[in-house]
Image (spheres, grey):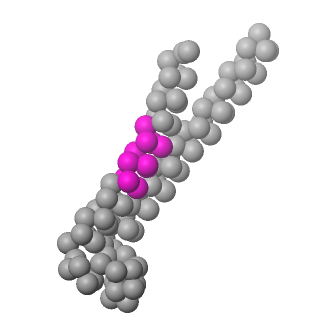
Protein backbone atom coordinates (compact mmCIF):
# COMPACT_ATOMS: atom_id res chain seq x y z
CA UNK A 1 0.00 0.00 0.00
CA UNK A 2 1.45 3.33 -1.01
CA UNK A 3 1.77 6.26 1.36
CA UNK A 4 -1.02 8.12 -0.42
CA UNK A 5 -3.42 5.22 0.00
CA UNK A 6 -2.47 4.94 3.68
CA UNK A 7 -3.19 8.65 4.10
CA UNK A 8 -6.67 8.34 2.57
CA UNK A 9 -7.53 5.21 4.57
CA UNK A 10 -6.33 6.69 7.85
CA UNK A 11 -8.04 10.03 7.31
CA UNK A 12 -11.36 8.45 6.33
CA UNK A 13 -11.27 5.99 9.23
CA UNK A 14 -10.27 8.72 11.67
CA UNK A 15 -13.11 10.99 10.59
CA UNK A 16 -15.74 8.24 10.72
CA UNK A 17 -14.38 7.20 14.12
CA UNK A 18 -14.52 10.76 15.44
CA UNK A 19 -18.08 11.11 14.18
CA UNK A 20 -19.16 7.98 16.03
CA UNK A 21 -17.19 9.00 19.12
CA UNK A 22 -18.93 12.38 19.30
CA UNK A 23 -22.33 10.76 18.83
CA UNK A 24 -21.68 8.29 21.65
CA UNK A 25 -20.18 10.96 23.91
CA UNK A 26 -23.12 13.34 23.57
CA UNK A 27 -25.59 10.50 24.11
CA UNK A 28 -23.66 9.71 27.29
CA UNK A 29 -24.00 13.37 28.36
CA UNK A 30 -27.76 13.14 27.75
CA UNK A 31 -27.86 10.02 29.90
CA UNK A 32 -25.96 11.79 32.68
CA UNK A 33 -28.34 14.76 32.52
CA UNK A 34 -31.32 12.43 32.88
CA UNK A 35 -29.72 10.77 35.90
CA UNK A 36 -29.46 14.15 37.63
CA UNK A 37 -33.24 14.59 37.51
CA UNK A 38 -35.40 13.72 40.47
CA UNK A 39 -36.99 10.24 40.26
CA UNK A 40 -40.46 11.58 39.43
CA UNK A 41 -39.02 13.65 36.53
CA UNK A 42 -37.22 10.66 34.95
CA UNK A 43 -40.34 9.15 33.44
CA UNK A 44 -40.66 9.41 29.66
CA UNK A 45 -43.92 11.35 30.04
CA UNK A 46 -42.34 13.98 32.30
CA UNK A 47 -39.31 14.32 30.05
CA UNK A 48 -41.55 14.79 27.03
CA UNK A 49 -43.78 17.27 28.84
CA UNK A 50 -41.15 19.46 30.53
CA UNK A 51 -38.09 19.01 28.33
CA UNK A 52 -39.67 18.20 24.94
CA UNK A 53 -37.85 14.87 24.72
CA UNK A 54 -34.28 16.03 25.32
CA UNK A 55 -33.05 16.96 28.78
CA UNK A 56 -29.72 18.27 27.55
CA UNK A 57 -30.44 20.31 24.43
CA UNK A 58 -26.83 21.46 24.45
CA UNK A 59 -25.85 17.79 24.08
CA UNK A 60 -28.26 16.71 21.38
CA UNK A 61 -27.66 19.33 18.70
CA UNK A 62 -23.83 19.58 18.88
CA UNK A 63 -23.54 15.78 18.88
CA UNK A 64 -25.48 15.48 15.65
CA UNK A 65 -23.72 18.46 14.04
CA UNK A 66 -20.26 17.11 14.86
CA UNK A 67 -21.22 13.62 13.72
CA UNK A 68 -22.50 14.97 10.40
CA UNK A 69 -19.41 17.17 10.01
CA UNK A 70 -16.94 14.35 10.52
CA UNK A 71 -18.97 11.91 8.42
CA UNK A 72 -19.05 14.43 5.56
CA UNK A 73 -15.29 14.95 5.85
CA UNK A 74 -14.85 11.15 5.81
CA UNK A 75 -17.05 10.83 2.72
CA UNK A 76 -15.09 13.64 1.06
CA UNK A 77 -11.84 11.78 1.83
CA UNK A 78 -13.28 8.62 0.25
CA UNK A 79 -14.32 10.59 -2.84
CA UNK A 80 -10.82 12.06 -3.14
CA UNK A 81 -9.34 8.60 -2.72
CA UNK A 82 -11.58 7.26 -5.48
CA UNK A 83 -10.56 10.10 -7.78
CA UNK A 84 -6.90 9.45 -6.97
CA UNK A 85 -7.26 5.74 -7.78
CA UNK A 86 -8.99 6.47 -11.08
CA UNK A 87 -6.38 9.02 -12.13
CA UNK A 88 -3.45 6.78 -11.21
CA UNK A 89 -5.05 3.79 -12.98
CA UNK A 90 -5.51 5.84 -16.16
CA UNK A 91 -1.94 7.14 -15.91
CA UNK A 92 -0.56 3.61 -15.53
CA UNK A 93 -2.65 2.32 -18.45
CA UNK A 94 -1.47 5.10 -20.75
CA UNK A 95 2.21 4.30 -20.14
Percent position of residue 48, x then y: 40, 84
Q: Residue at x 40, y 45 (%)?
A: 18
Q: Residue at x 46, y 30 (%)?
A: 10
Look at the image and tell me whether residue 95 can be seen.
yes
Q: Is residue 23 magenta?
A: yes
Look at the image and tell me whether residue 52 can be seen.
no
Height in image: 38 above or below 25? below
Viewer-nearest residue: 54 or 44? 44
Would you say 35 lies left or right of 25 here?
left
Percent position of residue 16, x then y: 48, 43
Viewer-nearest residue: 44 or 80? 44
State the image quarter where residue 63 is shown. bottom left
State the image quarter where residue 44 is shown. bottom left
Q: Quadrant of the C terminus?
A: top right
Viewer-nearest residue: 35 or 10? 35
Would you say 63 lies left or right of 35 here?
right
Q: Is residue 20 magenta?
A: yes
Height in image: 6 above or below 33? above
Magenta range is 14-24
Work out which residue is located at the far bottom of the displayed protein and give it.
Answer: 49
Amino acid sequence: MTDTRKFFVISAALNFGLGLLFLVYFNYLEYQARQELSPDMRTPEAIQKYFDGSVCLGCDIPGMVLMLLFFSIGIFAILLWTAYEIITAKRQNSN
